[in-house]
Image (cartoon, rainbow, N blue to C red):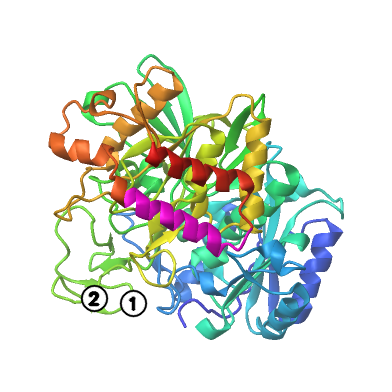
Amino acid sequence: MRNIAPAISPPAGIGDHKPANQAVLDWVQDVAKLTQPENIFWCDGSDCENAFLIEQSLQQNVLIKLNEKKVPRSYLHRSNPNDVARVEQFTFICTPTKEEAGPTNNWSEPAEMYLKLQTMLKGAMRGRTMFVIPYIMGPADSLLTKVGFEITDSKYVVLSMRIMTRMGDVAIKRLGDDANAEWNRGVHSLLDVDPTRRFICHFPQDNAIISVGSGYGGNVLLSKKCLALRIGSYLARKQGWLAEHMLILGVESPEGKKHYVAAAFPSACGKTNFAMLIPPKHFAGWKVTTVGDDIAWMQIRDGRLSAVNPENGYFGVVPGTSYKSNPNAMKSIEHDTLYTNVALTDDGDVWWEGKDGAPPAHAIDWRGNDWTPDSKEKAAHPNSRFATPMGNNPVLDPDVEKGEGVPISAIIFGGRRSDTMPLVFQAFDWNHGVYLGATMASETTAAATGAVGQVRRDPMAMLPFCGYNIGDYFRHWIEIGKRLTNPPLIFNVNWFRKGKDGKFLWPGFGDNMRVLKWIIDRCEKSGGAVESPIGWLPSPHDVDLADLDVEHKCIVEILGIDHEEWQKELAGHQNFFESLGGVVPEELLKQREQLAARFKQ
Ligand code: OXD
Ligand code: MN
């Protein structure tokens, strides 16, 4: 199998960076005793370690080197075709009681799951190298920053973690030698990449994760979905902050006035595009900068929410990325990038559906087969990915390393909805905003295995990522609101509404700046809006539509609401709340009643 590779023997000075912390040493010994690797490689995240691991990965066919002139210092990895997305059905929250995991998570009793996983891990790393990766999530000097260690038998994981996290000494230093310090224990083994032996398990009470049987990023870069969101959300509730599936962007006006906005969209709904947005010509002088494209950790500071991006890189969906859709992403992935499951052209370049220019006459597809434009199969997998350091982003926000984070003026919720949801509207207040987040829905995408295009409720885009009972999560949001003296305004957006002809009503991408500008106007108390049953709606003249080539009737349609569709939506909210079996807080049930009543007025 392409991603399972035999042990490597590093030269002296590489792979021997053992930390002093006894708790880490004991844990690593325990895992080694169980998995029986050929050797242990202690990572330090240095350039020479990286060069060594890349060389070994090339020799063992874990990586393919790309054309140095076209995509310098970049590589292609092909995963096992059975292993290309997150596996929500095999993702578990293992808490002492089922109630703690709640109605939206798969649950297992911790002792039972530990036993099952230990049985699978017995001798699993025989003949392989076991890597120990120290990393931090968050800026080096932030109070929110967390230390993690990931054990893995995959070089691809080590190389990806070096891009996606701040890895090495910075973590060892931050942890220090206190054996009781808080840190996350992550164990990953590819096993034999068999979907029937694939489990992604979280033990929030132990601050521990065990992931087996997969090599796909979302399942195995344990820093990301597992620590920063599932364990992170559990810690956040305990410690009084928020761990959210949100991008963070900065918007600066030509006069130099800056706001930060956090936005929760489900997987593969354009968070990376929105976080790197280039305003249209009409908005000359406006600047959008990226703090993060996937995860926000937010704490209360001076009565406001203040956000940091815990990650160090972007793990983005490749298909559809082009100079037209996202020039900043294209510039970010032109060098020093690790690609997974895209197509390889005959001149060693990468290609995917939706890239600028004509398709190549011949390529090798993501499975390693010959491909031509006449092929029935896609050249790149729909969930093929890039991993690229955030330092590559030409519009990286200058405050991305600021430990205290950036102050959030607005929170946006949004999903992929063909109907019902208007382009944008504003919640009446915090609890109404929490309701908008809690009832959010979106059409499913290729980021997780399963049917694509089905509408499902995905509260705060956290359905697959909330590490505890969703009812308690809603309650935590309501409690946070009570502690904010200057709360962000809350909005809902939908770039994906379609007209009767099945065509998108809104061009999206850079033109989303027009919506962002209205949101900023509302934060500045200068933007107009009309009151509607669902919240504050802009009328066409409240949104700057200059130079926009969209028919007025489409604008009216996308900004408006259809009362019949909303009756169905209301029933959908009720069904969803009922499906959660009584965990939904009173405050949100009341919001639903008030919404229904407003439609009757
Ligand atoms: C991601 C996801 O990879 O949400 O960010 O699936
Ligand atoms: Mn995501």
Instruction: Name the side, left or right, on which 193 lies relative to 337.
Output: right
Horizontal and vertical percent position of residue 362: 18, 71
Tag 2 residue: 377
Label 1 neighbourhood size at 10 Å, few (<14), some (14-19), many (20+)?
Answer: some
Q: Is residue 463 above or below residue 125?
A: above
Instruction: Name the side, left or right, on which 109 lies relative to 83.
Output: right
Tell me, yes or no, if residue 74 can be seen here: no
Horizontal and vertical percent position of residue 141: 68, 36
Q: Is residue 523 above or below residue 63?
A: above
Q: Amino acid at mark 2?
A: Glu
Q: Amino acid at mark 1?
A: Arg
Horizontal and vertical percent position of residue 137: 63, 48
Q: Residue at x 19, y 77 (%)?
A: 376
Tag 2, which secondary structure? loop
Instruction: Mark 2 and mark 1 in contact? Answer it, CB < 8 Å.
Output: yes
Q: Which residues are magenta?
A: 565-582
Q: Residue at x 63, y 59 (%)?
A: 582
Q: For the view shown, which residue lies furthest in the front direction? A: 601
Quadrant of the rendering where the C terminus is positioned: top left
Q: Residue at x 56, y 66 (%)?
A: 220
> Which one is in front, 547 or 469?
469
* Chain-order first, disc 2 or disc 1: 1
